[in-house]
Image: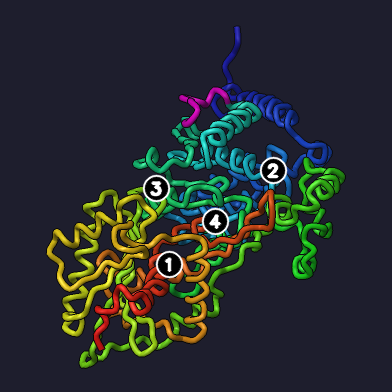
Amino acid sequence: MVRITREYTLGGPVLEGLEREAGAVRARAEAEKRKKFRSIAQRYAPAQREEVHLERQVHCDGDRVLQTILHYLDKVYRSPQQKEFHMMFTAAILRQIYKDDFAAHRHRVMAEYGFDSFKQLVLLCCPRRFGKTFSVSIWSLVIALCVPGTEISIFSPGKRQSVALMNHIFSYVKKYDEQDRILRRNEEKMVLRCLDGGESTINAYPSAVKTLKGVAGSILILEEMAVIDPEVVYQVVTPLLQLDKTCLVGISTITGEFNYMTRYLEAKDKNGEALFHSRHFYLACKACMAAGKAASCSHNAYLLPNWSSARKRKIINALMADQEMILNQEIGGIASNVNQRAFPRALVQRLFEAPRWDIDALAYYPHIFIAIDPNGAGRDSDFAITSMLRYDGKFIVLGMESFTSSSAAENHGLILAHLKALCGRDYFMNALKVFILESNLGLESEHIAHMLRDQGVNNYLVMSEKDKGDRVGFLTTNSMKMLAVEQLREKLVEGTVRIVPDEDLISVKHSAQSILKMLQAQLLDFQEVLKNSEFGKPRKFYSGKTAGKDDLIISLLLCTYWSGFLYTNPRYAHYLRF
């Protein structure tokens, strides 16, 4: 017979002793589990090192969640650079962690935990084999476990990368011994039971725009962002960023100076503040990069993670001695600038900073030139129009269009709308409309010429490079681009290319500020590309496709270059009225 006394009641010393013993058993089991994936350095470090985050004072629920995140991240080995990655990633989601308490606690949290920004847009650039994919895998899993209701959508360049990433995440689920928390899983999606009993989702998608419409996510991660189709950013990611707490993380090895990710590193808002919280890791020091010795620099070798071999890097340097550009880009994390800008930044700035050209309503303007660069109804190019006036030795831009159309009817409608806006100005009412059509795209130039005739457009001329009976319009060849670029560059130096004021600029699909911003970006991105040849000297050509679209600049080149054809070709002498 056991006599029940006060010592056996709830809160008594016997029950408290049993609870302490049970807690000690659980702690020992947890410690044994952690030992399985500790590094040697962590194994011999003081026992209290892992618990440092949990010793901080808790002021609100967000502190408890943040400390749990940091505690779980510390359970696996990470390189110093991966730890920095994770601090930047975590800073971007502080609004999601602290919810309504964020405004009241943000300054304290930044000071206490060492965050230097809480911007929701983060960009990281680093060399190959720096642990980018594993960093994303570890962090995504920890956030899904610790922040209930989170949906993380990770976009990779292709299906192979997205499947491999999901496998990496699953391998860390096993390392954390949390397999029982997986509710559903396939090669694109993993649904997890959070630590507090809620649910979170991790999605891993290949970057195919046509299959990504309608996806969601409160945390968006672009893995190898530099080689992901820019349209994924514009059509899929950007609409999701309209939600207040949605954040974007981009991480990649940089691919070139003109890549759209490279531009984002320097992007600023209207107040001059950087849009992205960015960090660029180099394996070459600034002095060696300035001296042109980046490929042979070893001063930043201490940044190499422990899985990278300094001995093997010397071998790689020897193997790629004649591929300095690739070595700098892939191994050193340095953007390649082997392809020069076709139009120097100073010339482009001069064009947009020059005083606008005010049209004299009393002057006589005999000709208006309208250059059209058709598209193939695809997403990789736009249907572009540039309308221009040649007057008093100047090339005056009157209007521009750039539109991702999906049918010939849309293209023709845009031409007619632009033409109607031009003819609506009294001083252009009697001007001859001279059309310059690019004829590279099948019979599209002929279709446009027939459309102008069928729609009853009057007082117009469609010029052709060849004699009557051959194809309508002008072929855009590499040699023509070289001559056109050289001519436009000369005109920019002379200051003879001008733009009308915003209120006079014609653009049916965009505002004046928007279309001019597109023109400026395409001028800066248009490159002089050198391509190696197996049988001779490197071939030079011009393109802006590596950084985005170049249709607007092509229509401008067509207009400036071929407009002189009206004045020099005898076939069109009777159209000249002075």
Q: Nearer the viewer, mark 1 or mark 3?
A: 1
- Magenta stretch encompasses residue 184: yes
Q: Quadrant of the C terminus?
A: bottom left
- Dot 3 or dot 2: first in sequence order is 2
Q: Nearer the viewer, residue 281 or 53?
A: 281
- Measure the alpha-carbon separation of dots 3 and 2: 40 Å
Quarter of the image with the N terminus is top right
Secondary structure beneath dot 3 equals helix
Looking at the image, is mark 4 or mark 2 earlier in the sequence? 2
Residue range of the region highlighted in magenta in the rendering: 179-189
Left or right: residue 256 compared with residue 298: left
Mark 4: give few (<14), some (14-19) or many (20+) Cα within 10 Å.
many
* Quarter assignment of residue 91: bottom right
1 and 4 marks in contact (CB < 8 Å): no
Q: Is residue 91 left or right of residue 456?
A: right
Q: Is residue 68 visible?
A: no
Image x and y of residue 60, in percent? 50, 51
Q: Position of residue 383 (x, y in %)?
A: 33, 58
From the image, tell me which residue sits under label 2: 51
Give how far across and how far down residue 155 sits, in percent.
Answer: 50, 42
Asked whether disc 1 touches disc 3, contact meaning CB atoms under 8 Å apart, the reply is: no
Name the residue beneath numbered marker 1: 553
Secondary structure beneath label 2: helix
Element class at badge 1: helix
Up/down of 139 relative to 349, above or below: above
* Circle 1 crowding by C-alpha within 10 Å: few under 14, some 14–19, many from 20: many
Q: Which marked residue is nearer to the observer: mark 1 or mark 4?
A: 1
Mark 4 sits on what residue? 122
- Which residue is farthest right? 311
For disc 3, the marked residue is 236
Whole-Å distance between the Cαs marked 1 and 4?
A: 31 Å
